[in-house]
Amino acid sequence: MKRESDVRHIILASHHRFAAGLADTIEFLGGPTDMDVICAYVDETPLEDQVAEVFAKFDPADEVLVFTDILQGSVNQRFAPYVGEHVFLIAGANVALTLELALAAEPLTCEGIEAALQLARQSMCLINTFQADVDDEDE
């Protein structure tokens, strides 16, 4: 499927400095190094201004993938008006999901993102109660 633009922008946004730490980890693991990072409420700059400034740099045909920290949090709410055909907003970002979607070779779709979210959910577990499948022949 051909898009109007082959450009993908990644925005990591959070309360305080979570987004900066996530960006650092993604870069360390071989992900993109040109992500836009918004650490909200660490200075006097209004969040609305920070979000508008980032989006002003993008062509409307560009794909934009926004990761935020908290569903229904103020950071996520500031990005909601920008959601559209090429702008995807994901709340509850973690390293595995962010890396997988940032490195996706194909244009993103809601269906593809939902599949990645499902895999990310399945990879979370409480190790205290986790029972790994062990093959007796491996011992």
Image (tube, rainbow, N blue to C red):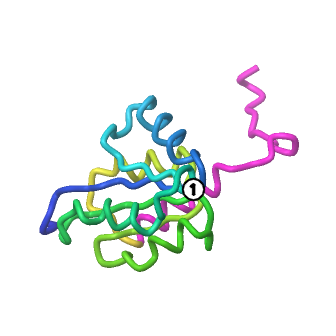
Quadrant where the N terminus lies?
A: bottom left
Give the magenta-colored segment's residue range.
111-139
Give the quadrant of the C terminus.
top right
Q: Furthest-right residue in view?
A: 128
> Which residue does the image show at 44% across and 71% down from the upper left?
79
**As drawn, 77 above or below 31:** below
Q: How many marks?
A: 1
Q: Nearer the viewer, residue 122 or 34?
A: 34
Viewer-closest of 77 and 113? 77
Give yes or no for residue 79 being in the magenta stretch. no
Left or right: residue 79 versus residue 9 is right
Q: Amino acid at mark 1?
A: Tyr
Tell me if residue 75 comes above or below residue 39 in the rendering.
Answer: below
Q: Which residue is at the front of the view, 124 or 62?
A: 62
User: Crowdedness of circle 1 by 10 Å Cα count: few (<14), some, many (20+)?
Assistant: some
Asked if 69 appears above or below 1 in the picture, the reply is above
Q: Residue furthest front?
A: 44
- What residue is shown with label 1? 41
Residue 63, percent across and down? 27, 63
Residue in the picture at 29% in, 55% down = 9
The residue depicted at 58 percent of the width and 46 percent of the height is: 18
Q: In this picture, is 84 found above or below 138?
A: below
Q: Nearer the viewer, residue 60 or 118?
A: 60
**Residue 119: percent from left, percent from top:** 56, 56
* Callout 1: SS: loop
Q: Position of residue 58 (x, y in %)?
A: 22, 62
Q: Residue at x 44, y 45 (%)?
A: 99
The picture places residue 120, in percent across and down from the top left corner, at 58, 54
Q: Is residue 133 magenta?
A: yes
